[in-house]
Image (cartoon, rainbow, N blue to C red):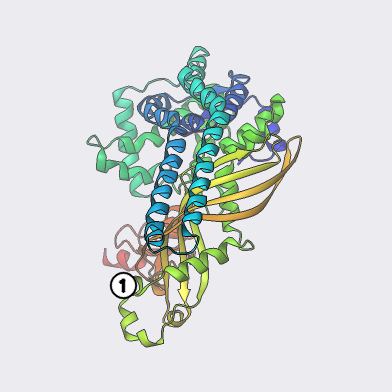
Amino acid sequence: MIRKYDDFIRVWDTSPIVVLDTNALIDIYYFSSETGENILNNLELVKSNLWLANITINEYERNHKDKREAAFKKYDHLSSDIKEITKTARKEIKKAFHSANRYQFPKANDLSIELCNKVNEMEEMIKKYKVEIDDEINKTKELLKEDKVRTLIEMIEREGNIGREYHLNELLSIYTEGEQRYKYLMPPGYLDVVKDKKDPTKTKKFGDLVMWKQIIERAQTSRREVILVSDDRKDDWWDNQLNRPRVELTKEFERETSTKIHFTKLIDFISNLAKLNDLFSISTIIEISSDELVREYILDSNHEIKGTLAKSITDKISDELLSEIDLYYEIRSEISVDELSSFNIKSPVFDGCDVLFDETYTRASFYCPFRVKVEASIEQLKSHGFSFELELDISLSIDAKIEHEGSKYSIDYNEIEFLNFEIIGIDDYVDHDEICVICGNKYGDYIHHYDGLVCESCMSRGEHVEVCTKCGEVFPTGELVDGTTCVDCTRTD
């Protein structure tokens, strides 16, 4: 994985092919006009290195219209939403003070008038805000109207850097191979089987595999190293425990092409490319990486956000939620929801963080809606071997101070404010006897021959276990006869 500039330069000096996946292209629509322009300018300077798989073009054509229209409207609702809030606030103030005025409470009318004046001030602030951001709105809409992402794709096409379209028999061969690969959880793309539910052809799930085959074919004919720019970190591409690409992919690529593939995120690629091109922009780098920056902040146990979340969850947990646990009724008298223990924030999924900078780019405000799972135990239930996994919808605002010099920067997060907090539900309690015996983090899905269960993630990596093809039980690596059948099944045969 390429992150550091020195590693990037070592690969860049080999004149690599740079492959952009579909999301890397579509994500550009979501950024501000300044960031979008900066990304596209950097990419244009290395257009001879850029290459797109044919299926990437097809997926872009299917998906970009809806994404582009959503980006077009991203500012449209803000002013109207705030206006509706102030309108509602004025009505509620008048309603609340109606009885007070009727019974002549002291100075109630004066307070009502003062609050309504504050609402008027808010409306004036909204008008001022709209004037201030009109320029940004117009620039962003102009970028979207011109559709410079499509212009980039057309430029890559003119360079002749598009993968060929596969014939039907070639696709059928890949689909057949894909069925076998996905059956044994071999990457890439096996998690896309969920697409079958809405796909009558049952072939869209193979999109990642088709792209992978096209990248391999391009490397075979060019004999050049490849940089794959992708933010896909699902288990069917990425080993999230070791934070690296799936080793099966890198080995397959080297075996088939006699060259190397390097994975990198869009943020890391643009950051390194901007240094190379001398087009570095601190606002671009922070905006592109905002989700990752806030995720790291949230998961850092040293920050106050954990304490704030724990308190909010404690306040919201009710008998209604706890009653889902049968054991609760047996020990109900012992439970008081005063303290959460073993508090663990897991897998925050962001809906796109918005970042606003001051004119000097020394201060920023992050607005972040996200969904997160939190595993926690109530002390009285902990001894019974149970913990809760709650799913939460959260919106928070974070103010930060930025120090930057050249391409180096640091962020000091100052103030956190929860704008929304809602418990979506509580998962079934976690019985620790059902937790994976290898990683100890996830539910087990497969029976281990000797003890307990093994989760799908550990199975997909296959570094410590293998499966008997007869009985389906899991064994430590090296214990199967000829690598396929366990001793018991061999005797039966």
Relative to 141, 399 lies left or right? right
> Residue 326, located in which quarter of the rendered image?
bottom left
Q: Nearer the viewer, residue 65 or 94?
A: 94
Q: Residue 130 in the image: x percent, y percent?
A: 52, 32
Relative to 323, 215 lies left or right? right
Residue kind at label 1, given as amino acid type = Glu
**Residue behind mark 1:** 324
Q: Answer whether residue 419 is visible to the viewer in this image.
A: no
Q: Secondary structure at mark 1?
A: loop
Q: Nearer the viewer, residue 150 or 282?
A: 282
Residue 49 in the image: above or below residue 107: above
Residue located at (72% from left, 25% from top): 278
Q: Answer whether residue 356 is visible to the viewer in this image.
A: yes
Q: Residue 106 in the image: x percent, y percent?
A: 49, 64
Q: Give the tally of numbered discs.
A: 1
Q: Nearer the viewer, residue 480 or 60?
A: 60
Query: Which quarter of the image is occupied by the C terminus?
Result: bottom left
Q: Residue 362 in the image: x percent, y percent?
A: 71, 40
* Neighbour tally class for label 1: few under 14, some 14-19, many 20 plus, Cα within 10 Å: some
Residue that lies at the very extreme toward the right in this rendered image: 405
